[in-house]
Image (cartoon, helix red, strand yellow):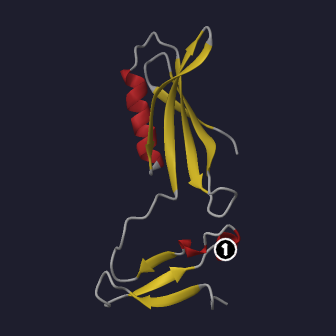
Amino acid sequence: MLSGMTTPVRCTECEGRGWKIVTRRGHMAAAGLGLAASAQEDCLHCDGPTETPQEGFEWEIRILGENGETPGLSGWTTFQATAMDELRTAMRSMERETPIKGIIRHRVYDFGVGGHTWTLREIFRAYVDPAGAVRFDRVGK
C-alpha cells in the first residue's frame, strides 16, 4: 500500500490549480543520513523546477600511444543516440593517422546508496575502420 509514501499538497507555483505529490522514496535511508528534508515534490499540473538528470551517457576518445592511453575529446548527454553521434563526429574529426578508440559509458545516479554517487558502466567501444567509418562494438553485461 502507498499510504505514507506520498502526500498530496496544494501547489503554490501554479496558484493551487494542481496538487503536488511529495515523494518519500528512500525516506528511511535519508532520515538515517540526516537528509530527510530531501523529499522530491512533483506537481501534477505545472512543470515546476527543472529536475537533475537521473541518468546520462558520456563519451570519450582515448589516444593510443607508446606510453599507453591519453584522454582526448569527451562529452556528456542524456541520450544514447546523441552520444553515439557526437562520438562519431569527434572521431572523424581526428587525424586519420592517429590511433584512437572511443568509449561510451552509461551513467546512473544512485539515490540512497552510500554518498549518493554516480555509477558508470561501459556499454560501447568504437574504432575507425580502414575505410574511415566509425564502428561500434557493444560491451557485454
Q: Position of residue 66 (x, y in %)?
A: 61, 8
Residue at the image point whose x is 69% and y is 70% from the top? 29
Q: Position of residue 44 (x, y in %)?
A: 40, 83
Q: What is the crowding at mark 1: few (fewer than 14 residues within 10 Å), some, or many (at least 20)?
A: few
Camera-side residue: 81 or 15?
A: 15
**Residue 104, placed above or below residue 3:** above
**Residue 121, placed above or below residue 112:** above
Camera-side residue: 108 or 35?
A: 35
Residue at the image point whose x is 61% and y is 74% from the top? 36
Q: Quadrant of the N terminus?
A: bottom right
Q: Position of residue 118 (x, y in %)?
A: 60, 50
Callout count: 1
Residue at the image point whose x is 52% and y is 59% from the top? 54
The kind of residue tagged 1 is Ala
**Residue 3, placed above or below residue 68:** below
Q: Is residue 114 toward the left or the right of residue 10 in the image?
A: right
In this figure, which residue is indicated by the disc labeled 1?
A: 31
Residue at the image point whose x is 58% and y is 53% from the top? 108
Q: Position of residue 141 (x, y in %)?
A: 70, 45
Residue found at the very far front of the displayed protein: 34
